[in-house]
Every structure is written in C-alpha cells, then in structure tokens.
Image (tube, rainbow, N blue to C red):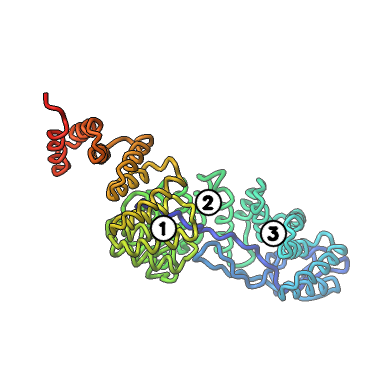
Amino acid sequence: MELRVPMAAARFAVHRLLAPAVLVLAFDGCHSALAQSTNQSSQSSDQSGSPSAQTVHERTGPYSSRTIRHIKVPVESSASQELTQAEDAIQKQDYSSAEPLLHKVLDHDPANYVAWFDLGFVENALGKLDDSIAAYRKSVATKPDVFESNLNLGLQLAKTNQPDAERFLRAATKLKPSSQAAEGQSRAWLSLAHAMEKSKPEEALAAYRQAATVQPKDAEPHLSAGLLLENENQLADAEQEYKQALALDPKASDALTGLANIYMRGRRFREAEEFLRKLVALRPDQGAGHIQLGRVLAAEGKNEEAIPELQAGAKLSPQDVSAQRELADLYTAAGKNNLAESAHRALIAASPSDAELHRGLGQALMRQKKFPEAQNEFFTAVKLKPDFGEAYGDLAFTANENKNYPLTIKALDARAKFLPEIAVTYFLRASAYDHLREYKPAAANYHLFLNSANGKYPDQEWQARHRLIAIEPRK
C-alpha cells in the first residue's frame, strides 16, 4: 500500500478585526475631533485618542486567544450621543442600524477618526469590504498614529492581497496599543508576518520571531514559524520551532501534527508514531489523527495496530474516501480478505468506474481462490484502464488458474506493452503454450524463464527443465 504523507493542517487562523465597543465621545462646541477636544482628567491623552473596542476574543492562531479592552469617554454633545447609539447597535450586532448613525456623525464631523474606525468595522460586518477599507483609510489619514486603525486597515488589505497591506501592518508594529500593549504588539507582528509569507518568507520569519520576543510565553509565533519553515522545506528548523511551541503549550495539537508530518516526510516513522499517539490521545474525536497514525503504523509494518486506527478515522471522517481505500488495501495486506472484499465492494458501489478499485476487489477475491470472480474484476479493470499493466498481470494469473490459456497469453502480451517482462511472466506464458501444445513458443519462454530466474524459483525451475526435456526435439 502506498504511504500517503499527510499534509500539514492550515494552522494560521485569519486575524479578526479589532471591534468597537460602547464609546462615548467628548466634543467641543465645534464638534472637533476627539483627540483635540477631550478635557477629562480621569483619562490619559493616549486613551482618549484611540478607537475603543468591546471585549473581543480574537484568535491569532488555533491555540491563542487575545482580549482587547478600551476606554469610555463621557458624553458632552448631541453628536457624541449619535455615536454612542451607533456603538450600542454594534454591541448588539445590529450593524444595519449602526451604519446610518455613523454616516450622520461623519456628515457633521468628517475628521472624526473614531467614527471612521467604527464604520470600517460595520462595513466589514455587512460584507462591504471595499467600503470597510475606504473607511479605515479615512481613519488612518485623519489620525495616522493609532495602532488599532493601522492594524485593521492592514488586515482588510491583506484579505484582498493588496500590496500596501504590509505598509499599514508594519506601521502598527511601531505604534502603541491603547491597552495590553504586549498582546497587541505581538498580534501586529503576527499579522505582518502572515501577510509577507508568500512574497517575503525570510522577512515573515523575522516578524514571527519579533512576535515571540514580545510574547515569549506564547506558542503561536513558533507554530506559525514552524509552518512557514515546513512549507519552505527547512524541516530541521521547522522541527525546532514546533518543539518550542510544544514546550510552551503541551496541548498544542498543531505542533504535534507538524512534528508528525516532518517525521513522516523524513520516513522517521517511530518518531511520527510517538507524536501521533499524543495527538490522538489529546483529540480522540478527530478522524485525521487516527488516519495518519494508521498510515504510520502501516508503514512500520504494524498492520494489526494500523487497522483499528484507520477504522476509527474512517468512522469519524466518512467523507475521507482515501482513508476508506487505504483501509481496504490494508485488509488485503493483512490477509483479512473477506473484509477487503466487503470494503472494496462498498467503494465500487460509489465509484463503479474506478479501475484501481476493481483491481483491489479482484486481488481480495483471488486470495480467497475465487478465481472466476477475480478474473471478471481484473477484466473490468483493464477495460476501464487499457494501459493498466499490473492488472493485466493479475488477469493472466487468474486466467491461468481458470485454465483459460489463450486469455493468459493475451493478458501477458498486453502487460508486456506497459511493463518489463519478469521471470514469472515468462513461466506463465511458457506453461500456457505448453498446455495448448504449442511447444516451440513454450520452449522459448521456458528458456527465457531459466535465464532470468537465477535460482529464485527452484520448483518452477525444476519443472521448466523437465518440460524442456519432454518437448524439445533431441539433437
């Protein structure tokens, strides 16, 4: 059975936008921008000059959750009341109501960078990506030194692969988040790295390492760096990143998957088995882990251990047809021919024109000595795939067992068009001609068999020599 090396899971979750929360603005009589108008002694100038966000749990990766909180500024004007209403609607996820309120605020005060920020978030929630980008651009243009605005704009631009995404994400790495600075900075570096992975992998790797420096106890930068290095075929470095991630988070299933994948690619099956067993213990309800563990065990020749893992994986992931096929092949390899027959019949019912499946069923039948049925399956296989050399060889063998010697010869000759002759094919052809009493081609093929057997088939070599004595004319 062919070993299929598992592909690494998509480990980098798309970063979510920072979301507005209940934000109450202080405006002067001329409705100037927040940064120029607040006189509240209880809030710092940095706080009052930043867009605010509700408590948001965003995932920078599968195993890390961030919480970002922002401040509230007291109400002093009717304009701020409208913005407060908009943010109340955002809190309730009533984006359709928030949108016109924000437009009304901006009609009165087009330099209100907080309203532009909120509008960018709302337009994104309404599926208006271009409008969201435009609003975030306005927010950044009005006040370019705000971390959250630059980050969200960069993330939105990255969604559509726009080249200036890097510019704003890089700007965010140089700005101070309004709260939880280390987490915010780490997120900015992670977002920048993700945006550069395809175009600038070395710079992306450096950005992941910056994120790791900012948040040394966070596994996510190491997970993402490991995946990047793995995709760049720098497997030794990827291995070290995954190990660092695992040291920080022993339950990081992506690290376990990454290490197992690297070991499988390097045919280090014993090590792959170790980490896949940990993965299955951690996530027993996920079929992919069982399937990959089954593949590794099969590659190690541990068929009896591999079968229950593939069975569990196939049950948990019924849509994974490749696992079902591998399980059917594994039944055959393990000599569980009745199970192999049943599995192949089920697969053929779903894919009746698959030549490989018909060959697999034929082999299961052949091993049960059901030669007439096996012959029919091999015949179907070569009919579906006329260049299927291996199936012609199987057809020749079953035809010989069924004493259909003309079909044996025909199948062997067809096989020879696609695969080189081997000792066994010479012997089968010689025996078929011998049974048909066509002694000249029989003798020729017996000689070809003896010349290529080299003592590997002692019984057949004895038979060939004695038949040559009987059928060749004496000199």
| Camera-side residue of 146 and 243 | 243
Residue type marked 1: Arg
Name the residue: 62% across, 70% down: 56
Q: Which mark is residue 149?
A: 3
| Image quarter of residue 87 | bottom right
**Nearest to N terminus: mark 3 or mark 2:** 3
Residue 344 drawn at (x, y percent): 40, 59
Residue 432 drawn at (x, y percent): 26, 40
Residue 14 drawn at (x, y percent): 59, 59
Which type of secondary structure does the marked residue at label 3 adopt? helix
* Residue 331 shows up from this direction: yes
Which quadrant holds the C terminus?
Answer: top left
Task: Count numbered badges in the picture.
Answer: 3
Distance from label 3 to label 1 (Cα)? 50 Å
Residue under pointer 2: 207
Residue at the extreme front: 437
